[in-house]
């Protein structure tokens, strides 16, 4: 009987000890981590607000200066060609702003990160945050959240918004800045399908009409059909985007030693080509949205054409550039989070140098892809790869 009471007493004692221990551990956890859980949400909002606010402030400041200089440079041309103020504001500068902002987005990201982070470091805020138990890895979370927003914004602008604005801006420049667009082409030869070659002596893109047209079809490297037409007109209102109307046409069909000839005045026909395939202007790939770029590249590859490198570079560059904010933010935050002699000025100078180096690398790698045969996807991602290595080493040496 006594042994039974002893066991019950021991069981109750163990339960009391366990409960007491759990409560004590809970108090310890609350003591050390309650401050962390109170600080971090507020800290996240603070850093995100500073980051995004400084980013847009840098865009507004630098673009305002760029518009002033651009307007001063082009004022004589605007007055010479009697450009209306409505067109200057809405057709030119309203489309100039997103193009310029997205082009120099890496610069604005770097300036924003370095500006407010070095200011926090100078006010000993970074030291206080780290001393409160927040690791540098955890400190980078609101930075990365901000980068997600900037990356989505950057890709949306580059892939869908800017191409439409570029068309309007280029049309304005051709009318009021004497930057004439190519509206015709001579001696155009185009592979419109596998084994199908089209040729025009002259093509007028204003009237969508070609002159001196011929179309050759080959099977097993042997000519099986030869079509000629004095004129060929693109049908802009037809349901099919490949609808053409030939005038004074003749078709010769060869089958072994036999030949069949047909001719007529007009002929409605489907030919796998569009006006955009016939006249090329500088920067044409920038006028395509990303879905249009993808369709155009696929269509040209299916035709057997190899002249799509600059379109592939543009397609991959839009994706790669949107990830640049993550890499440059890691570099900027890692460098400017320490309180050093020289302060914000030194960091801003370093940030400007690295930002322009990144933009220059984009241009150089794109040139290598077009002229030296570098794979387009590699050329688009080379700046991110190189700066990613720099970001890794900067992060490893960041304060903890």
Image (cartoon, rainbow, N blue to C red):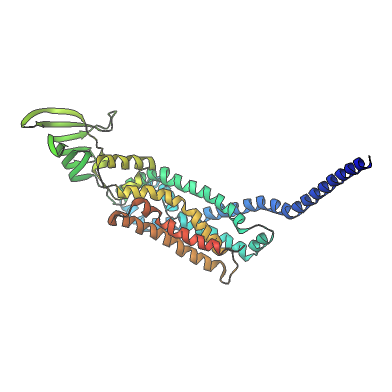
Tell which of 51 and 378 is nearer to you.
378
Q: Nearer the viewer, residue 390 or 74?
A: 390
What is the quadrant of the C terminus in the image?
bottom right
**Image vertical order of residue 218 relative to residue 327, above or below:** above
Where is residue 328 shown, x and y percent of the image?
49, 58
Residue extending farthest to the left is 257
Looking at the image, the residue that sits furthest to the bottom is 341
Q: State the residue in front, 28 or 353.
A: 28
Quadrant occupied by the N terminus: top right
Q: Is residue 191 above or below residue 121?
A: above
Q: Is residue 371 left or right of residue 28?
A: left
Residue 247 x %, y %: 14, 31
Q: Which quadrant of the figure has residue 297?
A: top left
In this image, 100 relative to 261: left or right? Answer: right
Q: Seen in the image, is 56 located left or right of residue 272? A: right
Rendered residue at 8%/32% (across/down): 256
Seen from the viewer's position, the closer of residues 374 and 207 is: 374
The spot of residue 360 in percent (x, y) is: 39, 60
From this viewpoint, is residue 62 visible? Answer: no
Which of the 4 image quarters holds residue 222?
Answer: top left
Q: In percent of the image, x 29 and y 39: which residue is there?
A: 299
Task: Name the side, left or right, on which 51 lies relative to 31.
Answer: left
- Residue 36 in percent (x, y) is at 69, 54
């Amino acid at each position: 009987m006594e042994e039974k009471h002893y066991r019950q007493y021991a069981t109750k004692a163990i339960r009391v000890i366990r409960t007491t221990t759990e409560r004590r551990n809970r108090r310890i956890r609350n003591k050390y981590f309650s401050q962390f859980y109170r600080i971090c949400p507020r800290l996240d909002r603070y850093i995100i607000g500073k980051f995004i606010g400084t980013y847009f402030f840098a865009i507004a400041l630098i673009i305002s200066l760029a518009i002033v200089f651009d307007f001063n440079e082009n004022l004589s041309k605007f007055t010479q060609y009697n450009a209306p103020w409505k067109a200057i504001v809405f057709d030119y500068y309203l489309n100039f702003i997103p193009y310029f902002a997205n082009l120099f987005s890496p610069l604005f990201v770097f300036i924003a990160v370095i500006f407010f982070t070095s200011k926090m470091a100078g006010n000993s805020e970074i030291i206080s945050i780290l001393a409160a138990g927040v690791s540098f890895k955890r400190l980078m979370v609101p930075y990365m959240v901000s980068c997600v927003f900037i990356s989505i914004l950057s890709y949306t602008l580059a892939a869908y918004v800017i191409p439409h604005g570029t068309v309007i801006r280029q049309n304005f420049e051709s009318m009021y800045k004497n930057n004439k667009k190519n509206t015709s082409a001579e001696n155009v030869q185009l592979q419109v399908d596998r084994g199908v070659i089209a040729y025009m002596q002259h093509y007028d893109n204003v009237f969508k009409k070609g002159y001196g047209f011929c179309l050759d079809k080959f099977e097993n490297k042997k000519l099986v059909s030869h079509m000629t037409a004095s004129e060929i007109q693109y049908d802009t209102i037809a349901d099919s985007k490949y609808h053409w109307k030939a005038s004074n046409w003749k078709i010769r069909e060869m089958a072994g030693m036999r030949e069949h000839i047909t001719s007529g005045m007009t002929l409605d026909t489907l030919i796998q080509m569009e006006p955009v395939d016939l006249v090329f202007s500088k920067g044409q790939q920038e006028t395509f949205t990303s879905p249009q770029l993808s369709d155009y590249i696929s269509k040209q590859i299916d035709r057997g054409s190899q002249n799509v490198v600059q379109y592939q570079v543009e397609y991959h560059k839009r994706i790669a550039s949107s990830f640049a904010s993550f890499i440059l933010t890691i570099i900027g935050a890692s460098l400017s989070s320490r309180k050093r002699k020289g302060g914000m000025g030194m960091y801003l100078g370093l940030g400007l140098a690295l930002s322009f180096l990144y933009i220059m690398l984009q241009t150089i790698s794109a040139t290598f892809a077009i002229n030296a045969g570098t794979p387009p996807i590699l050329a688009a991602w080379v700046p991110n790869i190189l700066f990613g290595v720099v970001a890794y080493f900067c992060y490893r040496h960041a304060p903890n």
